[in-house]
Image (spheres, helix red, strand yellow):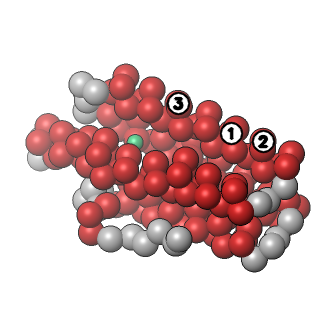
């Protein structure tokens, strides 16, 4: 169940990679907490931090794309927006219905799996673009 970090997920950019690692850790923490039977009050901190961190990370990524004139910017932003909505929906359900095995499953499908696929697809594509479009004098991230 737990997501592990591996080389396939590396974009080669420290800021992005560290944020991705943190996001994966948060998803794992959340799932473990639910499986351990923790209640809403106990997991609320992790859920809220995940929501905050997703927003912050996406903002950082989107700013980088703007800075380097990334052609797929709008498509990428639309995917981020969809994901943020899904995370918010899941959080709302979690608070309303309480933690359950079904929610652990949904967190895997809608959050964990999505993140891993997004990193391997969209984010690696973005990183490759930036690598080939940065000049030696341009600031790196
Ligand atoms: Fe992204």
Give the CA separation, mark 1 to mark 3.
11 Å
Q: Secondary structure at mark 3?
A: helix
Q: In the picture shown, does residue 6 fall above or below 114?
A: below
Circle 2 sits on which residue? 92
Res 5 → quadrant = bottom left
Callout in the foreground (2, 3): 2
Give me the residue at 29% from left, 46% from top.
Answer: 121
Question: Circle 1 — which element?
Answer: helix
Q: Nearest the camera: 16 or 9?
A: 9
Would you identify the image quadrant in which residue 105 lies? bottom right
- Residue 64 visible within the image: yes
Is residue 79 rendered to the left or right of residue 36? left
Q: Is residue 17 above or below residue 93?
A: below
Ligand 1 lies in quarter: top left
Residue 141 shows in the view: no
Q: Earlier in the sequence, mark 2 or mark 3?
A: 3
Horizontally, residue 81 falls left or right of residue 7, namely right
Q: Position of residue 136 (x, y in %)?
A: 12, 46
Assess whether mark 1 and mark 2 are in contact (beta carbons under 8 angstroms). yes
Q: Which residue is mark 3?
A: 81
Is the distance from the Cβ of mark 2 to the nearest ligand 1 atom less than 8 Å? no
Q: Is residue 2 above or below residue 123?
A: below
The answer to which of marks 1 and 3 sits earlier in the sequence is 3
Marks 2/1: CA distance? Answer: 6 Å
Residue at which label 1 appears: 88
In the current view of this chain or complex, which residue is farthest to the bottom? 36
The residue lying toward the viewer, choosing from 23 and 15, is 23
């Amino acid at each position: 169940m737990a997501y592990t970090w591996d080389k396939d997920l590396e974009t080669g950019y420290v800021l992005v990679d560290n944020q991705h690692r943190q996001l994966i850790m948060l998803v794992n923490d959340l799932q473990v907490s639910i499986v351990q039977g923790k209640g809403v009050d106990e997991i609320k901190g992790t859920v809220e931090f995940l929501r905050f961190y997703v927003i912050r990370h996406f903002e950082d990524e989107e700013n980088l794309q703007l800075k380097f004139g990334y052609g797929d910017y709008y498509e990428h932003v639309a995917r981020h927006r969809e994901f943020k909505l899904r995370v918010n929906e899941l959080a709302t359900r979690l608070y309303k219905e309480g933690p359950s095995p079904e929610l652990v499953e949904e967190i895997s499908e809608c959050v964990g799996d999505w993140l891993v696929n997004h990193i391997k697809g969209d984010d690696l594509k973005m990183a490759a673009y930036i690598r080939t479009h940065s000049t030696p004098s341009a600031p790196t991230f």
